[in-house]
Image (spheres, rainbow, N blue to C red):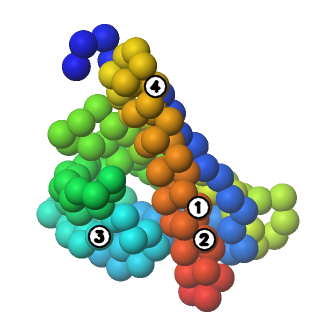
């Protein structure tokens, strides 16, 4: 890609459950994380590990009328608070941050994805479309996380 442009897509939500429970769901790639995935992300399969750092997985991503397989490796720069998925085939990194909320038993969860696009007009269109898509997907995933964490 000639002169790529880096950009970010971020979504946050208050979740009505303790931060530790919320983080445990996100870090559990065998049961928890797959159960919050939106329709666009399917068939998550663990290749190594399964909980937090050291996990490697692949899943199908359905977007814009096509399906691609994403392979990723997981790190935990701040265990219990920050989990990072690095795409093994593209320069894409998604960070999940879970912080205690203002009230007992609530968490603030942020999904932050850094991506690369083309430069110029085509890149601007690509960024606009992918931002709209991922914002919608992240709202769905955060809603799923809130429902699961409340009832866990």
Residue furthest right as drawn: 103
Residue 139 disc label = 1
Q: Earlier in the sequence, mark 4 or mark 3?
A: 3
Q: Kindly report the distance in space between the C-alpha atoms of the residues bearing marks 4 and 3.
A: 28 Å
Q: Secondary structure at mark 2?
A: helix
Residue 143 disc label = 2
Residue 42 disc label = 3
Q: Give yes or no for contact between labels 1 and 4 (Cβ–Cβ under 8 Å).
A: no
Q: Secondary structure at mark 1?
A: helix
Residue furthest left as drawn: 47
Front label number (2 vs 4) = 4
Q: Give yes or no for contact between labels 3 and 2 (Cβ–Cβ under 8 Å).
A: no
Q: Earlier in the sequence, mark 1 or mark 4?
A: 4
Crowd rating for badge 4 (residues with CA inside 10 Å; few <14, some 14–19, many 20+): some
The reply to whether residue 5 is visible in this rendering is no
Crowd rating for badge 2 (residues with CA inside 10 Å; few <14, some 14–19, many 20+): some
Q: Residue visible at 46% across and 41% down?
A: 129
Residue furthest top as drawn: 3
Crowd rating for badge 3 (residues with CA inside 10 Å; few <14, some 14–19, many 20+): some
Q: Kindly report the distance in space between the C-alpha atoms of the residues bearing marks 2 and 4.
A: 29 Å
Q: Nearer the viewer, residue 79 or 29?
A: 29
Q: Kindly report the distance in space between the C-alpha atoms of the residues bearing marks 1 and 2.
A: 6 Å
| Residue at image mark 4 | 124
């Amino acid at each position: 890609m000639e002169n790529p442009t880096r950009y970010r897509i971020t979504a946050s939500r208050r979740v009505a459950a303790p931060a530790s429970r919320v983080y445990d769901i996100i870090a559990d790639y065998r049961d928890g994380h797959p159960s919050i995935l939106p329709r666009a992300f399917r068939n998550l399969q663990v290749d190594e590990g399964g909980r937090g750092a050291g996990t490697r997985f692949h899943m199908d991503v359905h977007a814009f009328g096509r399906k691609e397989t994403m392979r990723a490796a997981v790190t935990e720069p701040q265990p219990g608070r920050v989990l990072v998925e690095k795409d093994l085939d593209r320069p894409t990194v998604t960070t999940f941050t879970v912080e205690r909320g203002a009230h007992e038993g609530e968490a603030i969860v942020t999904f932050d994805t850094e991506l690369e696009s083309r430069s110029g007009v085509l890149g601007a269109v690509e960024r606009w479309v992918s931002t709209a898509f991922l914002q919608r997907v992240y709202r769905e995933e955060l809603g799923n996380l809130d429902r699961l964490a409340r009832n866990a």
